[in-house]
Image (spheres, rainbow, N blue to C red):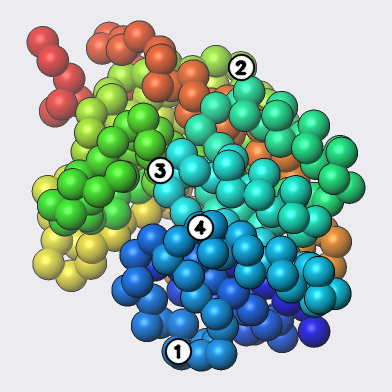
Amino acid sequence: MTSFALIGAAGYIAPRHMMAIKAVGGDLKVAYDPNDSVGIIDSHFPQAHFFTEFERFDRHVDKLHRRGEDIDYVSVCSPNYLHDAHIRFGLRSGCDVICEKPLVLNPWNIDGLAEIEQHSGRKVNTILQLRLHPAIQALKERIAQSNERHAVDLTYITSRGRWYHASWKGDESKSGGVATNIGVHFFDMLAYVFGPLKSQTANLREPERAGGLLSYEKADVRWFLSVDANDLPESVKGKKTTYRSISLDGEEVEFSEGFTDLHTRSYQEILAGKGYGLDDVRFCVEVVSQFRHAPIVSGGEQHPFVHKYLKA
């Protein structure tokens, strides 16, 4: 049975990792989080050891190693700015690693991880779940058969309450900002479907929302991301808290469903030796890192949702 350790057990996305571990027949041996609101573990692995102090978690993992009860994978669901440190811990503990998006905040962090990966002989896997979505795979196949250049609008609004900005997610130095925290896997998906990025323009960068333009090999993309419920279209307000839309040349690409099991699919691929590694994730990390430092351009082509926030 494949054994796992989990860092960030109280995190928003941790339950999906627990469900995935259980679904692939794995065993969660030990978990860590400085917060102890982790009763969700009882629904999946009630016998897992749990620690609120990293030093005790580290000691327990080491004890298992000395007993010959090695952990196969360390799953990282901690705050974004801690990912690279926790990945290093997993590699140095002789484990492969599965890390939630974004893998790291800056591309140079990937270089450091690649060195440790090489020295340890272990592998870093990241969750790029949209590559596994059937609608996205079908779109990729469709674009691969076309020689045309396309016009794409990407809109993603996922409502978050006041807690979001009071938490580490509201601190750009820790989360990377909205574009990184909720958008990095969309930028990966765009390159996966439309080819290498040629250029990007930043139009909007606020604590609640972001938007810009991306020019890929086969598409020009206008994008808008938000965590503010006020940005939801009138057609879904009061009915849904999340809105996802991709339009291709004015035609909507239906991909609003089918997200709940993508972490399980990701784990299945990783355990089969087909996980996405450091080289796969480098591009989308570069895009969001560049966006954080790019000058804001208010003229020219804009995503429709961006217009009302542009300063005169």
Distance from the alpha carbon under mark 3 to that under mark 1? 28 Å
- Looking at the rendered structure, the kind of residue marked 2 is Lys
Residue lying at 13% horizontally and 52% vertically, measured from the top left: 162
Compared to residue 220, the image places residue 153 above or below, namely: below
User: Quick one: quadrant of the N terminus?
Assistant: bottom right
| Residue highlighted by disc 2 | 198
| Residue highlighted by disc 3 | 181
**Is residue 63 left or right of 260 when viewed as pictured?**
right
Residue lying at 85% horizontally and 45% vertically, measured from the top left: 120
Looking at the image, is mark 2 or mark 4 nearer the viewer?
4
Secondary structure under tag 3 reads helix
Specify which label sits upstream in the sequence, 2 or 4.
4
| Residue highlighted by disc 1 | 42
Distance from the alpha carbon under mark 4 to that under mark 3? 24 Å
Which is more toward the observer, 39 or 12? 39
Residue lying at 40% horizontally and 46% vertically, measured from the top left: 182
| Residue highlighted by disc 4 | 54
Secondary structure under tag 4 reads helix
Which is more toward the observer, 156 or 40? 40
For the question of whether residue 213 can be seen, the reply is: yes
Looking at the image, is mark 3 or mark 1 nearer the viewer?
1
Secondary structure under tag 1 reads helix
Specify which label sits upstream in the sequence, 4 or 1.
1
- Looking at the rendered structure, the kind of residue marked 1 is Asp
**Is residue 156 left or right of 160 when viewed as pictured?**
right
- Looking at the rendered structure, the kind of residue marked 4 is Phe
Compared to residue 249, the image places residue 132 above or below, namely: below
